[in-house]
Amino acid sequence: MANTNAPFGLAPIEYLIGTPWNGQARRYHVDSTEANALAIGDPVVTLGTSDADGVMSVTLATAGSGITGVIIGMGGLKYGGPGGDLDNLSITVIPATKTKDYYVLVADDPNIVFEVQEIGTGTQLTATEVGLNCNLVAGTNNGYVSGWLLTNTTEATTSTLDCKLLGLVQRSGNAFGAYAKWKVLINNHTYRAGITGV
């Protein structure tokens, strides 16, 4: 049976030590001047600046240029508790053209293992590529979740590539080939130096 083509960006599933992901995330600021649409599953990277209250700012990552983490939710309140921009909690995608600042919840622990779908074109990744590093490729969200995918044109030992290939997600209906679902670790991470692939 062929793999299902249903991109979702990156989804946290577990930690590198094998324990399930516990849902923890950090709130980041998205400035009104940020020019990209942002959806759950999109990789983001820090900008080296913050909002007026010191909440670190992020922008959509560029494939092959480093990643801080992955958006797992829209964080309407700056500090939690009452107040803040409550309608930010009901949006599914932050628009490219923004009239205000936004806040996102980002899974940014460098030890989180993510699931991501491989692209459907090119020469598909095989068992011999497990352990190598690979880039992601940007994709348009579907109005709800990210369209980012794992590319199959960059796999190498290079330590600056986006992700480390940890193997296929082990479940029925997932196999090597177009649209395979992979377990990956963010390799070129803001909070940890990249590791050479094997």
Image: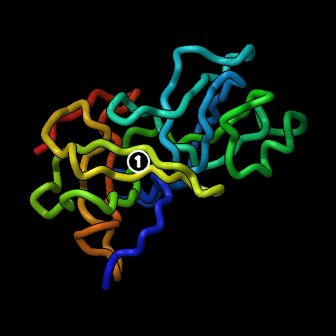
Is 22 placed left or right of 171 in the picture?
Answer: right
Residue 152 against residue 34 in the figure, above or below: below
Of 186 and 111, nearer the camera is 186
Q: Which residue is depicted at the point 16% across and 51% down?
A: 131
- Dot 1 amino acid type: Ile
Rendered location of residue 72, percent (x, y): 58, 49
Rendered location of residue 161, percent (x, y): 26, 36
Q: Which residue is depicted at the point 27% across and 65% down?
A: 168
Rendered location of residue 154, percent (x, y): 21, 43
Q: Which residue is depicted at the point 70% across and 34% down?
A: 103
User: Quarter of the image containing the N terminus?
Assistant: bottom left
Indicate the secondary structure of the residue bearing disc 1.
Answer: strand
Badge 1: residue crowd in 10 Å (few <14, some 14–19, many ≥20)? many
Rendered location of residue 190, percent (x, y): 40, 27
Q: How is the structure coloured here?
A: rainbow
Which quadrant would residue 68 be assigned to in this image?
A: top left
Q: Which residue is depicted at the point 17% across and 56% down?
A: 130
